[in-house]
């Protein structure tokens, strides 16, 4: 018996859940990428971690619902029994887990450039 192990490319998004961070726009851009590049559909996943705010403000609850709806729609459209294109977590993540994720993704942190 041959066992094939598949290791997709992992794109990592780590953002505070905030209206100005653009999480819905990032996820919609990923959807557009999957639409325009069907060969990548089973070869890449987006792991989006959204750190929730400390308060229960209605706008944040609305944003959370909006993001969950978008993620569900995209996963339903492009997912299969064995893969889903977006893994979304709305919680904080500890430093050691974050380091492990960075090593899996080969990510680097690119801060905004200020003049």
Image (cartoon, rainbow, N blue to C red):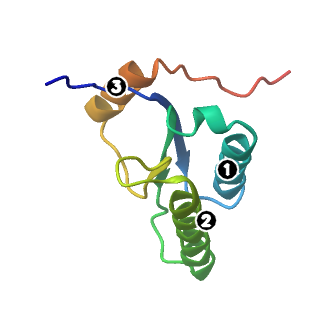
Q: Give 85 or 12, whichever is nearer the viewer.
A: 85
- Quarter of the view holding residue 64: bottom right
Marks 2 and 1: CB-CB under 8 Å?
yes
Q: Which residue is at the far front?
A: 1
Looking at the image, residue 79 sits to the left or right of residue 73; the answer is left
Measured as percent of width and height from the top left, residue 56 is found at 48, 77
Q: Give 11 or 19, whichever is nearer the viewer.
A: 11
Where's the C terminus, which quadrant? top right
Q: Which residue is mark 1?
A: 31
Q: Earlier in the sequence, mark 3 or mark 1?
A: 1
Residue found at x 50% / y 21%: 107
Where's the N terminus, which quadrant? top left
Looking at the image, residue 96 sits to the left or right of residue 79; the answer is left
Residue 88 versus residue 14 in the image, above or below: below
Measured as percent of width and height from the top left, residue 35 is found at 71, 46
- Quarter of the view holding residue 60: bottom right
Q: Which residue is mark 2?
A: 70
Q: Is residue 23 visible?
A: yes
Using the numbered discs, state the Cα–Cα distance from disc 2 to disc 1 in whole angstroms: 9 Å
Q: Residues within 10 Å of mark 1 (few under 14, many from 20)?
A: many
Labels 3, 1: front one? 1
Labels 3, 2: front one? 2
């Amino acid at each position: 018996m041959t066992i094939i192990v598949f290791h997709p490319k992992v794109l990592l998004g780590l953002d505070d859940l905030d209206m100005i961070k653009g999480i819905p726009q990032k996820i919609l851009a990923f959807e557009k990428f999957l639409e325009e590049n069907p060969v990548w559909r089973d070869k890449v996943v987006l792991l989006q971690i959204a750190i929730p705010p400390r308060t229960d403000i209605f706008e944040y609850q609305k944003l959370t619902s909006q993001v969950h709806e978008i993620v569900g729609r995209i996963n339903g459209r492009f997912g299969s029994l064995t893969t889903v294109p977006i893994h979304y977590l709305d919680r904080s993540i500890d430093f050691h887990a974050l380091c492990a994720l960075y090593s899996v993704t080969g990510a680097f942190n690119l801060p905004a450039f200020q003049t």
